[in-house]
Image (spheres, grey):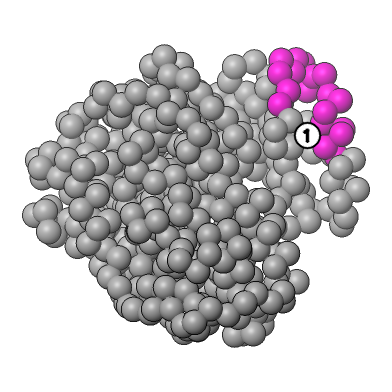
Amino acid sequence: MIKFGTDGWRAIVDKDFTAENVERVTLAIGKYVYETFGFEKPIIIGYDPRNKADEFSLLCAELLYQKGFNVKLSQNVVPTPVLAYNAKLLNACAIMFTASHNPPEYLGMKFIPDYAGPATSDITDKIVSNIDLEFPFGKCGSYEKTDFFPPYYEHLKTLIDFEKIKTLNTNIIFDGLYSASIGYFDKILEDNGINYDSLHMNHDINFGGGEPDPKPKYLSELIERVKSSKNSIGLANDGDADRFGVINENGEYVSPNEIISILLKHLVTKNYTGSVVKTVGSSLIIDSVAKHLGINIIETAVGFKHVGEAMRLNDVIIGGEESGGLSIKGHIPEKDGILANLLILETLAETKKSLIELQTELYNIAGCKFYTDRIDLKKSNPEEIKTVLNQFKSLKNITTEEITDIDLKDGVKLMLGNTTKILVRPSGTEPLLRIYFESDSQTKLDNLKKEINKIIS
């Protein structure tokens, strides 16, 4: 069964991700584009470094060209945000072959409408309903290979102060992580005379035996390099470069929630105005900083498609999610890890402060440091999941802590005062519940986990 999750259809190559299924999904997307816009709507196609991504993208391009569309196929590996920006620039729909940060055996197809952000559920539901349905042939359209990087790069120059970054005294260490950002982020630094060190700067379908996920587990070599290099920070992206990972001067991972908060402060100093968009799963540190700055907070369900939609409908300074995706005003409503990395460098150069100092400022604003954790609870059927959710909805207190607010926009979010929350929500891809914890002390967090384990058992 082909199903579109929060960010497209993903499956294991040569098991479910086969030429036959790629053809079925390609034609289903083609039918959606034809019925919505007609054959005159261009379709652009890109791919990340994964196994067979280039082959499947070529198959997709040829099918759509033969159907009657005007198709542009990337001439090389391309990051998702680069392709998405070109969708907006060319008023085109885009198809990206990527499985983002998933393990190496996976590949996926992501549909990006002409607004340059993730397709919303109404669009992907329509695409899935189109699978195996016919639509008319037009006469053959046009087909060409394209370099999508130059216009994206020119756009970045309107958002980033590269001259300011050149004044940065901090050493930059970039972990290519075998990802799509290789040949993009490093080229931008080189073209602007910004010095950096690097590792893992080759495309590898096996991602060096790890996963293309910029989390501490897969950034161990970067962390060690930062620790052994005085006054250094580490930067990385995931497989298709729409997410970011940051290591501070002590060799510690900086959470995406803290990066979003730091960048929100920075953008306000650059006279950006508007709201901040965060998901229900994002940290309370963002709320604290936004309230300190007098910035309105818009909270969405988990998934960047919801963040992107809110960015399209509102005046927004920055939108981000806890899993490492963000974008800003004047850019596209899609995650961009390359932009995020550049904004971090710009912030360090502008403030003349270390990442550690910027993190400390956040804790001072919030009055605390936040601690987080998560439990995944496997359930065998939807009814069991519903039962647990109803159980949490009916809670009035946990231990001696009174539940002060409840939010049901995505699962059940329970607030216990201003510095403690519990979020229980179904996974979008697996038969399990994810239970998120956040509090202002590790002891309080541990006690909450013990109490919740009692409740669910």
Q: Quadrant of the C terminus?
A: top right
The residue lying furthest to the front in this view is 139
Q: Indicate whether 248 appears above or below 149.
A: above
Residue 82 visible to the viewer: yes
Q: Is residue 82 left or right of residue 121?
A: left
Q: Is residue 178 left or right of residue 103?
A: left
Q: Indicate whether 366 appears above or below 457.
A: above
Front residue of this view, candidates 248 and 319: 319
Name the image quarter holding residue 45.
Answer: bottom left
Name the image quarter holding residue 164.
Answer: top left
Secondary structure of the residue carrying tag 1 is: helix
Q: How many marks?
A: 1
Q: Residue at x 26, y 23 (%)?
A: 271
Q: Residue at x 82, y 31 (%)?
A: 392
Front residue of this view, candidates 144 and 270: 144
Front residue of this view, candidates 213 and 338: 338
Q: Residue at x 78, y 34 (%)?
A: 452
Residue 83, x across and y down, in percent:
38, 61
Residue 68, x across and y down, in percent:
49, 77
Residue 274 on the magenta segment:
no
Q: Residue at x 80, y 19 (%)?
A: 397
Q: Which residue bears the numbered disc 1? A: 452
Q: Indicate whether 391 appears above or below 289.
A: below
Q: Quadrant of the N terminus?
A: bottom right
Type of the residue with mark 1: Ile
Magenta range is: 388-407
Residue 182, x across and y down, in percent:
29, 66
Front residue of this view, candidates 353 and 429: 429
Q: Residues within 10 Å of mark 1 (few under 14, many from 20)?
A: some
Residue 11 visible to the viewer: no
Residue 397 on the magenta segment:
yes
Residue 105, x across and y down, in percent:
56, 76
